[in-house]
Amino acid sequence: MEKETFIFDRNLFQKADQVRKRFCKDEVHLRGIIEFSNHCCRNCLYCGLRRDNKNITRYRMEPGEIAGLAVKIVAKGVNTIVLQSGDDFYYTQKSLGRIIGEIKQRTGAAITLSIGERPLDDYRAFRDSGADRYLLKHETSNPALYRILHPGQALKQRLKILEYLKKIGFQIGSGNIVGLPNQGIKDLVRDVLFLKELDVDMAGIGPFIPQKDTPLAAQPPGDLDLTLRILAMARILTKNAHLPATTALASLDRKNGQLRALRSGANVIMPDFTPVGYRKDYRIYDNKIGLSLRKAKEIISKAKRTISRGRGDSLKKRP
Ligand code: SAH
């Protein structure tokens, strides 16, 4: 079947759900996310953290605060900590390495970094400090569109980093945004094929949501059904990659967005543990919800699935 026709298959969600059940079972993995800084040196057109956005209160969490919070999260039974931020070089190779080391030592939990592009040497140091996974979405596999949306950055560099991360032993995650201006169905199909080719351990797929203080403020958001279809296709093609029911999906449909994602191939959910005082300023897009652990568990139980008690490491067999 033509790949583009495949996307609009009537039974796509059902098929994705079957593939999910076969390869990932009924467990849903919880990942506790700490958005520890909203400073960013990049200028991505869609993102509210972009450096040219002056209409934002910037914050940084102190190392002790980050590690202390991680300990509390693990005490609640969440065995993966995701550290996410803008591309913020205030945190050096050394200081971030120390934070990672402390979390590792005090909790033993899996640590995922989602902190953007850094010198390759930093990644090696973070890995040595105890980071297990790295999330770096390719955002769009269309190089021309990528260039427009990310001034001064190139898709090629993103890919080079992903390959490097894999080589030095990280479990890697990538992913894309659905519904970017001037993005076509072909681009989206290529996004999913890219995830398959790169053989990612995990992938975040979410809709574009406009943010009022960005150049894309007036653009329409991505379509919910289309985003779920791309997610479903990613499940069918990647088979056992970890795929989160992203928070951005909940922004389009608060009541059912993430539940529908769990039924369309997703097997991960990421409750937000960013301290409430900072949360409102981590505004990558408008109306971002802060998913509580309680709510995440509710969604899992509504989907009639179980909560994983383990670390939820990659299901891929690596040599
Ligand atoms: N600085 C890190 C983390 C970025 S924020 C990095 O570059 O990897 C995490 C993700 O939020 C991004 O990868 C992007 O896919 C998503 N994002 C940012 N702005 C968005 C928007 N307006 N709509 C949807 N997703 C957005």
Image (tube, rainbow, N blue to C red):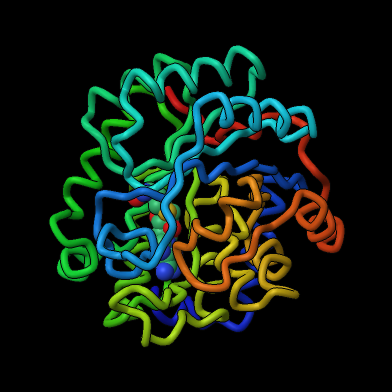
Q: Quadrant of residue 192?
A: bottom left
Q: Residue at x 43, y 73 (%)?
A: 208
Q: Nearer the viewer, residue 227 or 292?
A: 292
Q: Position of residue 148 (x, y in %)?
A: 17, 69
- Using the image, determine if residue 25 lies above or below residue 112: below
What residue lies at 20% left-to-right and 54% top-to-bottom?
Answer: 155
Looking at the figure, which quarter contains the C terminus?
top left
Ligand 1 occupies quarter: bottom left
Question: Is residue 289 shown above or below 122?
Answer: below
**Observer able to see residue 196:** no
Task: List x then y, in percent, for residue 130.
Answer: 48, 18
Viewer can see residue 26: yes
Is residue 111 rendered to the left or right of residue 146? right
Which residue appears at 48% of the width and 77% of the height?
Answer: 7
**282 up-or-down from 77: above or below:** below
* The image quarter in which residue 68 lies: top right
In the image, what residue occupies the spot 48% across and 62% down?
A: 283
Q: How many marks?
A: 0
x, y percent for residue 52: 25, 63
- Quarter of the image where the N terminus is located: bottom left
In the visual, does 270 lie left or right of 210?
right
**Frontmost residue, 22 versus 60:** 60
Horizontally, is 63 left or right of 118 in the view? right
Asked where in the image residue 96 lies, by quadrant, the reply is: top left
Q: Nearer the viewer, residue 183 or 214?
A: 214
| 104 on left or right of 262 | left
* Viewer-nearest residue: 274 or 240: 274
Residue 265 x/y as whole percent: 63, 60
